[in-house]
Amino acid sequence: MKLQQITKTELAKRMHTSRAALNRLLDEEDPSLTLTTLASAAAALGKKVNIALAA
């Protein structure tokens, strides 16, 4: 967000969610983060998420 100079309000708008939901996403103490939400945030920033399971 800092590199792209995007505010929380703008990111929430791009994700089609509320700013309160975005605040939960950004809260390191909130355990409710889902992969879907993470992927949505990444897409809103022009990025994508890659997940790999390692042995």
Image (spheres, rainbow, N blue to C red):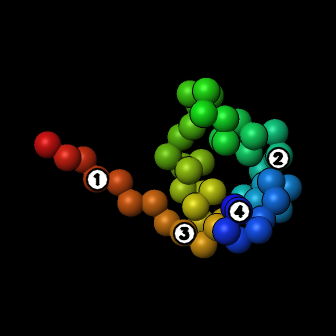
Indicate which label's residue lies in the foreground, 3 or 4: 4
Along the line of sight, which residue is nearer the eye, 3 or 39?
A: 3
Badge 3 element: loop
**Quarter of the picture holding the C terminus:** top left
Residue 47's disc is 3
Residue highlighted by disc 4: 2
**In the image, 49: left or right of 24?**
left
Badge 4 element: loop
The image position of residue 28, as x and y in percent, is: 60, 33
Indicate which label's residue lies in the foreground, 4 or 1: 4
Q: Quadrant of residue 44?
A: bottom right
Badge 1 element: loop
Badge 3 or badge 4: first in the primary sequence: 4
Badge 3 or badge 2: first in the primary sequence: 2
In this picture, is 4 found above or below 50?
A: below
Residue 13's disc is none
Q: Residue at x 82, y 46 (%)?
A: 18
